């Protein structure tokens, strides 16, 4: 990778974002990227490269740098007032691996006191999870199966006697952590007045508790769009609010199904804007770790969307499809620092 002068590239790019592109630039270098250049003899253009940035290895792939540059320019022109961020939670905001081991997802953090119910939930997973990825099942039929799976799981949670204190204890013991740079990213977006929608087919209560325990603060611009529990006065789970949000309807349509945040989590987390005003924010920065996460912006008539993907595992198997799907792709459980620098640039009114 050629080291380029800071007179051509902003310092924030040199600090954290060095892009591996799959084709050489046709014109003058973009002010956002350093490309693979020089002698490429004997090398596959799509070959993986290790890049050491600030002492750590960062791998980033951009399939169409010219298109990305146009999108960045368009979003900067609209400014923060037209921008919203849509993010998946597990494996996107959170680390895929912690100390070399697979981290827990918000879905499997919760452990019920009676192990019988944990076993029943596991059996449901073993039955329905293969159906989720079965390409032979029509979408309408698969949607019904996912609704069935989620509703049975929720019924087991109610029957098994989940408590809010149990959620707090489960999160405290969980092997789950945010990517480095996530807190700074949320702080930046709060400062700029950019709303953040965290979409999840899991449990909002778990996600909010992870935010409380790991970040130790709330954000007035952050809203969790997920399945929300209803507790009685003694903190026992009684029911779920609204309609079920599952993997096939986890998108902006789910805003209509989302319930307000719990009073005890402080409603300052709720977006101050009405849903109609949110839909007027037609520029989107989308963060996900599965190609299906691109559907999170369904239901939003956006003008410009920059999609950032995190390919955490089995890179060689999925690189081709992921690099075509996402505008920017981070490999091997990268930090959030590159996205932080990108968001800073998108919200900046200063010229390069």
Image (cartoon, rainbow, N blue to C red):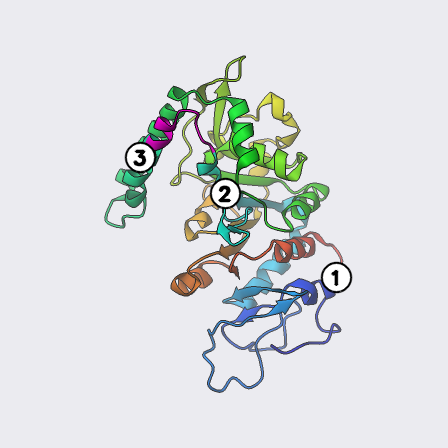
Q: Dot 2, how many residues are within 10 Å of its Cα: few (below 14), some (14-19), or many (20+)?
A: some
Looking at marks 3 and 1 on the same chain, the residue that comes earlier in the sequence is marked by 3
Whether 236 is drawn above or below 299: the answer is above
Please rate how many residues cluster around mark 1, counting C-alpha atoms within 10 Å: few if below 14, some from 14 to 19, many from 20.
few
Instruction: Residue at 56% x, 28% y: name it.
Output: 168
- Looking at the rendering, the stretch of residues picked out in magenta corresponds to 110-119
Q: Who is closer to the viewer here, 82 or 90? A: 90
- Whole-angstrom CA distance, mark 2 to mark 1, is 29 Å
Please report the residue visible at 64 percent of the width from the left and 25 percent of the height from the top.
266
Q: What whole-number distance in Å separates the C-alpha atoms at marks 3 and 1?
A: 54 Å
Q: Nearer the viewer, residue 200 or 95?
A: 95
In terms of sequence position, does the residue under pointer 2 or pointer 1 come before the other?
Answer: 2
For residue 151, say whether it is visible.
no
User: What is the residue that sits farthest to the top in this orientation?
Assistant: 233
Q: Is residue 301 visible?
A: yes
Label 2 sits on residue:
300
Q: Nearer the viewer, residue 102 or 31?
A: 102
The percent coordinates of residue 331 (x first, y second) are 51, 61
Residue 124 tag number: 3
Q: Position of residue 127 (x, y in %)?
A: 27, 39
Q: Nearer the viewer, mark 3 or mark 2?
A: 3
Residue occupying the point 72% across, 66% down:
10
Q: Is residue 105 above or below residue 5?
A: above
Q: State the image coordinates of residue 67 (x, y, percent, origin top left).
A: 54, 64
């Amino acid at each position: 990778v050629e080291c380029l002068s800071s007179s051509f590239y902003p310092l924030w790019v040199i600090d954290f974002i060095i892009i591996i592109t799959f084709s050489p630039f046709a014109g003058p270098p973009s002010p956002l990227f350093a490309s693979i250049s020089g002698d490429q003899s004997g090398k596959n253009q799509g070959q993986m490269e290790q890049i050491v940035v600030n002492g750590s290895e960062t791998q980033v792939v951009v399939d169409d740098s010219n298109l990305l540059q146009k999108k960045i320019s368009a979003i900067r022109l609209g400014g923060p007032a037209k921008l919203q961020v849509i993010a998946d939670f597990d494996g996107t905001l959170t680390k895929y691996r912690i100390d070399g081991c697979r981290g827990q997802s918000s879905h499997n953090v919760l452990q019920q006191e009676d192990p019988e119910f944990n076993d029943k939930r596991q059996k449901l997973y073993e039955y329905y999870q293969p159906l989720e990825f079965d390409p032979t099942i029509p979408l309408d039929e698969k949607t019904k199966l996912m609704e069935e799976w989620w509703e049975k799981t929720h019924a087991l949670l109610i029957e098994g006697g989940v408590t809010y204190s149990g959620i707090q204890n489960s999160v405290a013991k969980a092997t789950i952590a945010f990517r480095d740079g996530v807190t700074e990213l949320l702080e930046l977006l709060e400062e700029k007045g950019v709303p953040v929608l965290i979409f999840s087919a899991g449990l909002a209560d778990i996600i909010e508790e992870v935010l409380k325990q790991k970040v130790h603060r709330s954000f007035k611009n952050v809203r969790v769009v997920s399945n929300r529990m209803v507790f009685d006065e003694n903190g026992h789970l009684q029911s779920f609010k609204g309609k079920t949000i599952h993997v096939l309807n986890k998108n902006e349509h789910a805003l209509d199904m989302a319930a307000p945040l719990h009073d005890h989590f402080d409603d300052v987390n709720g977006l101050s804007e009405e849903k109609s005003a949110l839909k007027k924010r037609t520029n989107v920065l989308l963060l996900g770790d599965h190609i299906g996460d691109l559907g999170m912006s369904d239901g939003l008539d956006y003008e410009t969307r920059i999609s950032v993907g995190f390919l955490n595992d089995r890179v060689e198997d999925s690189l081709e499809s992921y690099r075509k799907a996402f505008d920017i792709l981070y490999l091997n459980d990268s930090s959030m620092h590159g996205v932080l620098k990108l968001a800073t640039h998108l919200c900046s009114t200063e010229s390069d």
